[in-house]
Amino acid sequence: MRRGLSKTHERLLGRLKGILLSQRGIDEGLWEELEEVLISSDVGIRATEELLSSLRKRAARKGVREAQEIYSLLREEVLEILKGCEAPWELDPSDAPQVVMVLGANGVGKTTLVGKLAHRFASEGWKVIIAAADTFRAAAIEQLEIWAERASVPVIRHREGADPSAVAYDALEAASARGYNLVLVDTAGRLHTKGDLIEELKKMRRVLGKRKEGAPHEVLLVLDATTGQNAIAQARIFTEALGVTGLALTKLDGTARGGVIVAIARELGLPVRWLGTGEGIEDLLPFSAEDFTEALFGPS
């Protein structure tokens, strides 16, 4: 976690230290500087305003007068916010096969995430099967099969250009017939503003639900951390249209904008399930508010 968030940590911590770990009192100038740092770290305007309002009240309650005392209070506030979206997804073997539908905009890393999830659950002893329901992107199926081979799990595929819902349905059929616990459905990337593409995902949800009550059991939206505040706009539209149940934040290792997760937690209240922290098959972590806060601010 610390390695994956190193860029965000260095940017945020470096600027905060300059403001808070100095011999100065608390005044309006301090709060304005804090606001600027948080917004520039992609915490977001609304989340920053709420965070600073709460921080001011906490500081007043505790009688804090020195800037350096604000640092630990800020850490506590961020941890409190993040705990609100800490909710690990757990596979329910009594209702197998479970279906996880993975969706998101183009280029956010869905296929890579599916491969990492397959590896993780298969390593824990679950029987996993993947539906290659991205039938439009060139070489998408081949890319997924490479990941599946690394994870030692099978892939259900159709020809390029086939109906994605048919692929998802066949994968669920195969899982039911062969005693698999988990179906991971890799969908094509699509712009959250394109209504016809969203309708296609809605169809897939309906098809899966007709084949098995309660499916998909998880609608996992993948967000690219490098996009900052745009990730929140994507999450809102996908959630309204498709009932997103959990989030995965990818490419944290390649950005200093990891603070967006605070904005996501504050503004959306959606559970953050997974963090992608690198290119390797093992570089996937379940979200932990304590671990994330420590990676941002250091030990308490």
Image: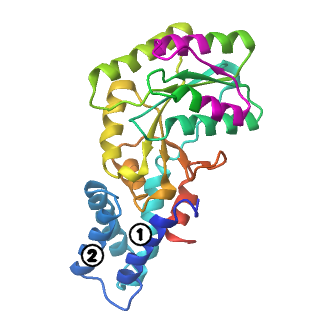
| Residue at screen point 64% across, 33% down | 146
The amino acid pointed to by label 2 is: Glu
44 vs 280, nearest the viewer: 280
Direction from residue 4 to residue 24 in the image, left or right? left
For disc 1, the marked residue is: 74
Q: Is residue 33 above or below residue 66?
A: above
On screen, residue 142 versus residue 105, left or right, reads right
Dot 1 surroundings within 10 Å: few (below 14), some, or many (20 or more)? some
- Residue 78 visible in the snapshot: yes
**Mark 2 — residue?**
33
Residue 37 image point, x, y percent: 32, 70
Total numbered badges shown on the rendered structure: 2
Q: Quadrant of the C terminus?
A: bottom right
Q: Quadrant of residue 124?
A: top right
Residue drawn at x 29%, y 58% is 50
Q: Is residue 138 left or right of residue 132?
A: left
At a point 53% along the width and 14% down the height, the residue shown is: 159
Colour pattern: rainbow
Q: Earlier in the sequence, mark 2 or mark 1?
A: 2
Amino acid of disc 1: Leu
Rendered view: 71 above or below 221: below
Q: Quadrant of the N terminus?
A: bottom right
Viewer-nearest residue: 212 or 187: 187
Specify whether residue 22 is painted magenta. Answer: no
> Is 70 or 119 nearer to us in this picture?
119
Q: Residue, x 37% and y 83% (percent of image)?
A: 18
Q: Secondary structure at mark 1?
A: helix
Q: Percent from the top left, x then y, of residue 288? A: 57, 52
- Let me know if residue 101 appears in the view: no
* Label of residue 27 in the image: none
Which segment did they paint magenta? 144-171
